[in-house]
Image (tube, rainbow, N blue to C red):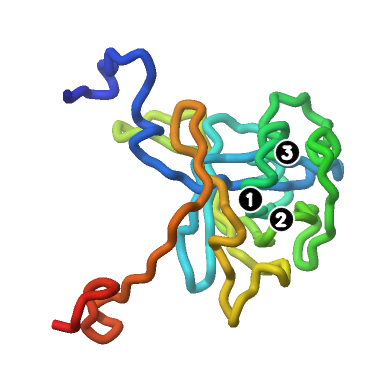
Amino acid sequence: MFYEPRLGHGLPHDPFKAIIAPRPIGWISTLSATGVPNLAPYSFFNAVHSRPPMLAFTSETMKHSAANAVATGEFVYNLCSRPMFDAMNISSGDFPEGVNEFEAAGLEMAPCRMVHAPRVAAAPAALECRVAQSMQLQDASGTKLAGWIIIGEVVGVHIAEAFLRDGRFDTAAAQPLARCGYRDYAALGELFEALRPTDGGTYAAGQPDR
């Protein structure tokens, strides 16, 4: 099938988010301007740069996390593992302003070192970020949308010692969760290593150099 999004897809459910999958879950913690902690998951999230390390999350309306990040210039990404799904799911609720989602989800907060916002103490890793850029999105015709993108520079990294193996972060052991469209989620499954041609000519794991 083919469809133009502006004309509709004719399906019972929108396939867009299921096609762009899996998407890492950006579990974002912030502080409000008045000092109230906030925690919420975002599936429009990813790393966007490595030198310096930067990541971004998009809020389709100016929700609490985005508003707090813009107001304070700070936020934290908390890696959400499979065992933490229930807490993450609770934190996605439509809570009124001023509610501390850490408390609602039964999560312990831990202090950060470079930013004021708290982090999820039990997360396998957490990235402290300072807002580098924020902007309201617009479509191809220039019409302003309700959505905002928040880009943060990582200024501090927390890694739980249990997930460091031989000098590497053990992604498989951390079991990061991903969003797969509709109400579907996935936890990281099989990992395999493949070298790039620039790594010495090996095109894929198990294949001879060419």
Choose the circle earlier in sequence order: 3 or 2: 3
Choose the circle earlier in sequence order: 3 or 1: 1
Position in image of residue 3 (x %, y %): 21, 23
Q: Which mark is residue 81?
A: 1
Q: Are marks 3 and 1 in contact (CB under 8 Å)?
A: no
| Res 11 → quadrant | top left
Q: Is residue 46 left or right of 121 when viewed as pictured?
A: left
Tally the numbered discs: 3
Disc 3 from disc 2: Cα separation: 11 Å
Choose the circle earlier in sequence order: 1 or 2: 1
What kind of residue is marked 3?
Ala
Q: Residue at x 24, y 80 (%)?
A: 202
Q: Residue at x 76, y 52 (%)?
A: 120
Which quarter of the figure is the C terminus placed in?
A: bottom left
Q: Which residue is mark 3?
A: 87
Q: Which residue is mark 2?
A: 123
Task: Pick whichever, 92 or 87, lies toward us.
Answer: 87
Disc 1 from disc 2: Cα separation: 7 Å
Task: Pick whichever, 202 or 109, lies toward us.
Answer: 202
* 37 w.r.t. 144: above or below: below
| Res 165 → quadrant | bottom right
Q: Residue furthest left?
A: 210
Task: Look at the numbered disc 3 and give the secondary structure of its residue.
Answer: helix
* 101 w.r.t. 162: above or below: above
